[in-house]
Image (cartoon, grey):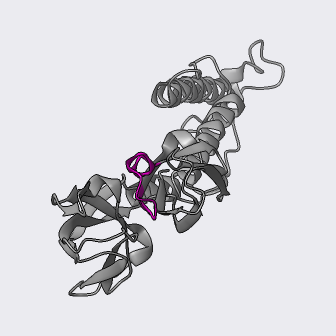
Amino acid sequence: HQAEDAIDAHNASNISVADDTGLFTSSDVEGALKEAIEKANSAFTSANNGKTDIASVIGSPATSGDTFSQLKTHIQNSKNDLASNLTTKGQASAGTETLNQLVTKVLNINGAEIEVVYSGYTRVRGYDVTDFTPISPSITNINECVIVSRGMTAGVMAGIPITASRTAISFNASNAFASRAAQSSGYDSFNHYFDIVRFKNVKSIQKGTHVFNSSGTSTLTINAVVPSKTLLFFTSHTTSTNLIDSFQSCSVSNSTTLSFSGGRSGDTSAVVKFEWQLVEFK
């Protein structure tokens, strides 16, 4: 340091810096200021480049001009959307979870996988009967399964085509059951072929039996579903000997209602039996 009365005694380059923490390599104020400005510029450039990189990874609507607070909001919004979509796909999630936790849950999402776990037939003999076919080995995860009819062999009962007496078919873990209603006479037999199909990773499967007057219509209340995401299976039979009563139908009328229809012969003493199964997908 020059003498106090020297002309340039107080120039920054002549004033020493007491750098006790070792922040600078320079020992005078001018050098220290230069280093501080360089470090500030470097930090700004690094931060700006960092925002640009983060915005690029996030994508729209994020931009490089956003603040860090705005970039944080974009990331959180995307996490919230991801959590909501995961929950919709059956993986309960929240936007407060880490990004890694949410991404890992994606691996738990599976599509609607289909597996035929058993194929066979039941042989129905005579009339007014219910026959069963043992299923071996027994079916596991039976609540995920439905039975799908593949049709019957041809047959005649007292001159009436077999289609005049559609056959209802159902199952449990050990047996498949086929039954048809009584005819006035006839003992011809036929086979009812079927598959038992397992639908994996579906939202719900509802099953039931519904009986009503064969010549009328009927409705049944079910647990709420999204009709556009459901698949309905059914088989049916009628006690009527009138051919028109063999034309039976079932449909999903709305989110909580199944509608059934029998024939229109006017045989009020006859009934129709439906075995129905409704699969709702995620």
Q: Is residue 212 above or below residue 125?
A: above
Instruction: Decide which of 15, 95 is in the foreground and name it.
Output: 95
Quarter-of-image position of residue 161? bottom left
Q: Exactly how many numbered labels are in the figure?
A: 0
Q: Looking at the image, which residue is at 37% across and 63% down?
A: 200
For the record, the magenta segment spans 234-248
Q: Please indicate, yes or no, whether residue 79 appears anywhere in the rendered image.
A: no
Instruction: Decide which of 198, 110 is in the foreground and name it.
Output: 198
State yes or no: residue 72 in magenta: no
Instruction: Decide which of 83, 198 is in the foreground and name it.
Output: 198
Quarter-of-image position of residue 144? bottom left
State the residue lying farthest toward the right. Answer: 5
In the image, taking residue 100 as reference, residue 147 lies left or right, namely left
Q: Looking at the image, which residue is at 18% across and 68% down?
A: 190
State the residue lying farthest toward the top. Answer: 7
Q: Please indicate, yes or no, whether residue 222 appears anywhere in the rendered image.
A: yes
Q: Looking at the image, which residue is at 35% across and 59% down?
A: 165
Q: Quadrant of the N terminus?
A: top right
In the image, taking residue 135 as reference, residue 104 lies left or right, namely right
Instruction: List x then y, in percent, for residue 194.
Output: 24, 65
Q: Is residue 2 above or below residue 144?
A: above
Instruction: List x then y, in percent, for residue 264.
Output: 53, 44
Instruction: List x then y, in percent, for residue 268.
Output: 60, 57
Instruction: List x then y, in percent, for residue 128.
Output: 37, 77
